[in-house]
Every structure is written in structure tokens, then in C-alpha cells.
Image (cartoon, rainbow, N blue to C red):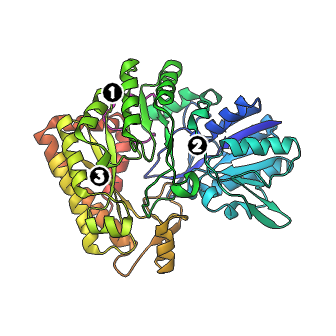
Amino acid sequence: MRILLINPPLTGTASNLTVLGLPLGILYIAAVLEKKGKVVEVFDSITCEPKLETKRIDNEKIHIGASWKRLEDEIRNKKPDIVGISNQFSSQVDNAIRAAEITKKIDARIITVVGGPHASCMPQDFLKKESIDFVVRGEGEYPFAELVNAIEKNKSFEKINNIAFKKEGKNIINPISQIDNLDELPFPTYHLLSMENYFGIIKEGLGRVTLATKHTRQISLITSRGCPYNCIFCSIHQHMGRKWRANSAEYVVRHIKYVVDNYAVNHISFEDDNLIVDKERFEKILDGIRKNNINITWDTPNGIRADRADFELLKRMKRSGCSSIKIGVESGDQHILNSIVGKNLELKKVVETASACKQLNIPVTAFFIIGFPGESKKSIKRTLDFAYTLKKKYYADSVITIAIPLIGTKMYDISKEKNYLVGGRNPSEFGGKDGLVIETENFNLDYLKRERNRFYKRVILLQILQTIKKPSTLLRYRWLLRNPKNFMNILSYLTKTK
């Protein structure tokens, strides 16, 4: 039985043309299938050509990756029995569905399977489509393999955890289970796609923003799954669970060494949501990088908790190659953090971490969100003022995100209950798809956009003054200097009034 795993093309925006890394989900699934002796291929719409394909859809939207005709040709040529489709973002649901429709148009007998975070939270969004046969929820490696085995042997699907499907007009949605021992998983099947094409995309400046490194042979690693925290804006519990599980330090170091030795990788982005929950494990990873003389830089694009990163740990991180870090702060108002966000983080810890990073010359970026249900204009101002202070005193950059009410989050449920959900385009969401945004009696979307843009204008002026005073601070933005067009796009985006 032939299996084809597809990463469909993306819909992006002209002001935010970004590719966010390798399709690790299907690469891990492919690795487990190969280990079990299955015939599996991967078609990644993003890396299938040496130069990233883009095509304007309208004044705002851009098609990123292979054309739909190219995808159709691939499916026809591969002649798969099963097609697995990755859907990494809710904003890209339509593209996943279209890939399934193309598959069924070619041959209705091909079994279609969709997986990803949205599929985990809202499997019915896919099951209502005639073109989709199965949904994989949560971690897909073993459930997908079990599903393939059941199809091959004509067995029942009813006892396969994480699977959802249609039976006699009804949706059968099986419970989600997690993988306890992540070290059982083989490394992702990097060999099933073109790594050189991917590195070419990074070199063109179209990858995730990575501060203070000149290296372009970058990949992402995820070394842990699950989250024990309760932030209202996060949907991770719906597909990765509340129990934090991690690869051992030894496994992680072997994985790093593997990609360095086989693909000349020189920068790692640790995409974990909770990289340093277990500080002892993390310190062993840092020690392993140094003991094995692995010459890389690395960063933490999804953010780490400021209250887990003390001065001594940051110093060890720097020695092992840390080029920059990001920290999740969310709000500069302690009351909002405690009573609304549920972050359980003291702002004084953020200041301590920013101060330590300044002393150690580690570029740091803080993530903030404005527009939580229950926020006031005063609390939003406190957040923006706090972010500005971090920049002024500690050279810390900030990313200000407008709250996105993701389905499966407490924020979505609260906003729905209070009738705060309205239609609109949130500029924070990848893909720029029209969806739901939050508007309350205290603020609307236009207000949030104006305040965010005013903040960025202030920061740009501050950055100019800091650069004059300390020119070396400009080196952390070398990724912009490599790609002037990207710089102009960002500058244009930040200076819009709406």
C-alpha cells in the first residue's frame, strides 16, 4: 500500500510573506511508517522547487508554494492508496480541504486523512466534507500507522485512539492519547524532501526571523510536548495534552549531531513550548553540545519562561551557542497576567531576565498580547509602556500580537459567552484569513491596531537613537541587512495607521 504525505501550499499576505519551517509533523509520521516497513513518500509544496513559488491571488493574498496543478500532477504520478494531509494553521483549513478534493477528483478510492491542531480541536470541520475520510487528532505518529494497518487488513477503526471518521452518517470521534516515551520516535525523515531547497528559502530571508546569527542552514527541533500551564490564549492542551513529556538530553544531542553531520546544519531553532521546564535536562543538553564540540548557534522562537532562566543558566546557554532568546510575557499589567491570562508569572522576573541578557549580550525579544477579553485601555497602555521600558533599559525587542480567539482555548469560550466575537481580519494571524476577532465595550480591532502601530513607531525612533549611541546593537538585525526588501516590507507594515 502506497502512502503519500502532503504539506499543501499556503495562503499568505504581501506584508507577511513567511515560511515557518519544515513540516515536522508529517516527517515524524513518515519516519514511524518507514520503521514499520511501509512505502511512504512526502510532497512538500514549499520545498519542491529550488526557488519558492509565489503567486498573487488578489491585492492582499499570496499563494505560497506549488501550484494546485503541480499538486494534482504529483498525486497522479505517485498513485497513492492513502494520502495524508497536514494542516498546521486554522487559517489554512481551506487549503487542506482543497488538497483532499483534488485527491478524490483523481481517484475517489484514494483514502484521505487530515491532521494538525485544528483537526484536533474541530474534527467535525473536516468530517463534514465528502472528500475527507479520516481525521487524526493529537500526536499522529502511531495512530496514523495503526490506521494504515487497519486499512490494509480490513479491520475496524473504532478502537484506534486519536482517530475520527464517519460511520452510517454519524461522526465517530475517538479519545486522544499521548506518547509517553518520545525517545521511541525515530528522527524525522529529512531525506524525503529537499533540504537544500529549504536552506535556499532561509537564505532568501523568507524563513522565521532569527536574530544575531549569520547562519542560514537552519532547522527547527521540537524536544518536548504538552504543557502544564493554563494560559487562556493557547490551544496546545487540545492536541498535545497537559502532561509535559520530553526527549532525553542524550536523544536531543544525538539528533542535533545527526542533522549537523548529515545536512551541515549550523543553526537550531528549539520550537518547544516549554523548553526549560526541566532545567536539569536542559543543562545536560547544553553540556552535550559543548562536550561533543558541536559548532552551532541556536535560539528559542516560541519563547521560554522568564522565571526559569536565571543568570547562571543564561550564561551556560550563551557558551553553548545561544544567539538570541524569546520570552513569553503576554501582558505588562500584573493584574491581567494573574486574573485573566493565567500566566502565573511575576513581571519582576521578566525584568531580571532582560537585565541578565543585556549583561551577557544575548539579544532578547518579548512576546506580548493586547486585546484580551476583560482588558481595559489602561491595561493595554501598561503593556505597551512595559514593553517600551524593556527596550529603553535593556535593548529588548517586543512582538505585540493582537489577541486571536483560537477555537479550543479559554479565550474563545469566554469571548463567545460574552458576545465579544465578531468577524474581521486579525493582522496577527498567519495567512491573513478573515475569521473571528475580539471586540469589547472597552476596545475594537481598529483601536488595537492603532495602538500597536503607535508603539512600533516609538520603538523605531528609540532604536535609531540606541544605534547612534551603541552601533553594535545593529548587528543583531543582520537578517534584515541580508534582505533589504524584507526590511522595507516590515517598515511599511509597522508604519501603517490601520
**Which residue corresponds to the image point at 43% horizontal and 38% vertical from the top-left?**
270
Could you tell me residue 94's position as x and y percent? 64, 58
Q: Is residue 95 left or right of residue 4?
A: left
Which mark identifies residue 398?
A: 3
Whether residue 68 is situated above or below residue 259 in the rendered picture: below
Badge 3 element: strand
Badge 2 element: loop
Which mark identifies residue 180?
A: 2
Badge 1 element: loop
Furthest-right residue in view?
154
Q: Nearer the viewer, residue 401 or 99?
A: 401
N-term mark: 1 or 2: 2
The residue singled out by tag 1 in the image is 320
Which quarter of the picture shows residue 286?
top left
**Which residue corresponds to the image point at 65% horizontal and 54% vertical from the top-left?**
176
Q: Is residue 172 left or right of residue 343?
A: right
Which quarter of the picture shows residue 73?
top right
At label 3, counting other C-alpha atoms closer than 10 Å, the crowd grade (few under 14, some 14-19, many 20 or more) is many
User: How far separated are the C-alphas under marks 1 and 2?
Assistant: 28 Å
Screen quadrant of the N terminus: top right
Q: Is residue 424 visible?
A: no
At label 1, counting other C-alpha atoms closer than 10 Å, the crowd grade (few under 14, some 14-19, many 20 or more) is many
Furthest-left residue in view?
469
Screen quadrant of the C terminus: bottom left
Q: At label 2, which amino acid type do we have?
A: Asp
N-term mark: 1 or 3: 1
Q: Nearer the viewer, mark 1 or mark 3?
A: 1
Q: Which residues are magenta?
A: 206-217
User: How far separated are the C-alphas under marks 1 and 3?
Assistant: 24 Å
Q: Nearer the viewer, residue 341 or 361?
A: 341
Q: Is residue 405 left or right of residue 120?
A: left
Q: At label 1, which amino acid type do we have?
A: Ser
